[in-house]
Amino acid sequence: MSVNKGVSELLVDFIYELKYDDLPQEVILQAKKCLLDYLGTTLYGATTPTADKIRNFSLKFDDKPKITAIGNHQKTELFKAALANGISSHVLELDDGERYARVHPGTSIISALLPLIEKENIGGKELVTGIVSGYEVALRMGRAIQPSHRNRGFHGTATCGTLGAAVAAAKVLGLSREEMLYSLGIAGTSASGLLQFLEDGSEIKQYHPGKAALCGLLSAYLAQSGLTAPNNILEGKRAFFQATSDEYNVSECTNSLGKKFTILDVYFKLYASCRHCHAPIEATLNLRSQSKIANQEIEKIEVSTYKSAVDGHDNPIPQSEVGAKMSLPFSVAVAWKKGWAGPEEFTPVYFNNPEILSLAQKVEVKEDPSLTQLVPAKRPAIVRIFSQDGHKFEERVDLPKGEPENPVTEKELKEKFRSLASISKSKEEIENIINIVETAEERIGEIFSFID
């Protein structure tokens, strides 16, 4: 790769040249894990009221529906399938992510790719390569601009997800090098998404990856149709890095490119809430299993954690499912009360429960600067429970379950999928989906018969 090229071109050069046969076996297996995890969260997410609203939207415009929107039970149009998939896959807050980039990549990238391969009748090797390519772009972008990007109010899943989805779609479509560069350029000017939802718990958060999937797909098809775009959309003086961050590190886009694939750094979630709440949830569950304190005996619960986990997440009385999933006090309270924090625990029956809300108001959240200094290498939290008789119980978690350093097992990941998919699929259908994903190279075309 020429040293005279800018980072946009260098990154596109690498993705353009990347082939399935270049991928290490561990990277291929990881892409399949991401696909299976994505399908589980999306199938369950498609049963939620938020997904119903998108179905109603699609019905207004579907003249010749042909494409599968996961869990929709009816065909739709290509771009609306990508939109619906992105929203359904993110609504549970159970989708994969990466802590350095602060991006949920699968919800944007795979949401764009599945409708694309169905429409174009593209094979499984291309899908796997597209997933790896999209993750590589989205996560490298996030690493380059975080934490400044988030501090300025941008949602990395919406912005970086758009870039990743566009390049992934361009890769799967087999676009030329120039067309792929245009895809990135069109996506760069389309990338948007603000964190204002942290203030009110509104559903616009779920829209972000749906929009990213839609815009990414649109960017690739527009480039294929001849629409031009800047060849330096990342590094130009009025381009993505400058516009969306005060501090950025361009070298993150190309460091160890081809030697270390970023998809290996994603985490898989066990709890249906914002990732910033997971270390406190896990510490709370550990304390619950170790101690025998009744709710009424708790004087207070202290949560010491890092700054990003405090900002926008210290709301003890959430008014919506999104608000509950963003609320650290509620997450701790419901985990203590129920002994788990899955999709059910963040529904209205729980965030309107007086006993849980009373406990949530006993949760004091504060930043510990020494823990903030550990981010992003760790995402730590210390939970202290004080009883009315003067006892104190303490638990610390530095990296919650699911991180590469504290991974879920393949068995745990499949159990998660089976649990989520069972809301709408039979045991036989579930096992068929697992088998198809495991042999995606030869059988991916069969998947659409089981995920509609």
Image (tube, helix red, strand yellow):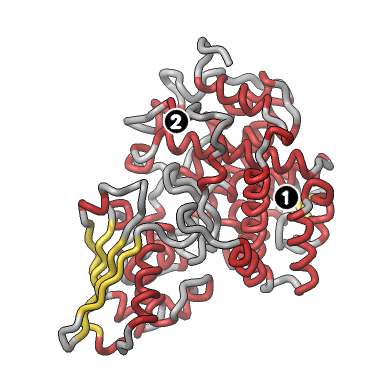
Q: Relative to the observer, which residue lies in front, 173 or 385?
A: 385
Residue at mark 1: 61
Quarter of the picture containing the C terminus is bottom right
What is the distance, in whole Å, between disc 2 and disc 1 at their CAs?
Answer: 41 Å
Q: Where is residue 102 in the image (x, y as percent from the top left)?
A: 44, 46
The residue lying at 58 percent from left, 30 percent from top is 258
Q: Which residue lies furthest to the top in this view?
A: 4
Circle 2 residues within 10 Å: few <14, some 14–19, many ≥20: some
Circle 1 residues within 10 Å: few <14, some 14–19, many ≥20: few
Q: Relative to the observer, which residue lies in front, 376 or 347?
A: 376
Write down the quadrant of residue 350 in the picture: bottom left
Write down the quadrant of residue 100 in the picture: top left
Residue 352 vertical position relative to residue 121 in the rendered view, above or below: below
Q: Position of residue 342 (x, y in %)?
A: 51, 71
Disc 2 marks a residue whose amino acid type is Glu
Quarter of the picture containing the N terminus is top right
Q: Where is residue 131 in the image (x, y as percent from the top left)?
A: 65, 42
The residue lying at 33 percent from left, 30 percent from top is 247
Mark positioned earlier in the residue sequence (2 or 1): 1
**SS category of the residue bearing label 2:** helix
**SS category of the residue bearing label 1:** loop
Query: What label does residue 252 carry, if any?
Result: 2
Disc 1 marks a residue whose amino acid type is Phe
* Residue 52 visible from this viewpoint: no
Q: Residue furthest left?
A: 390
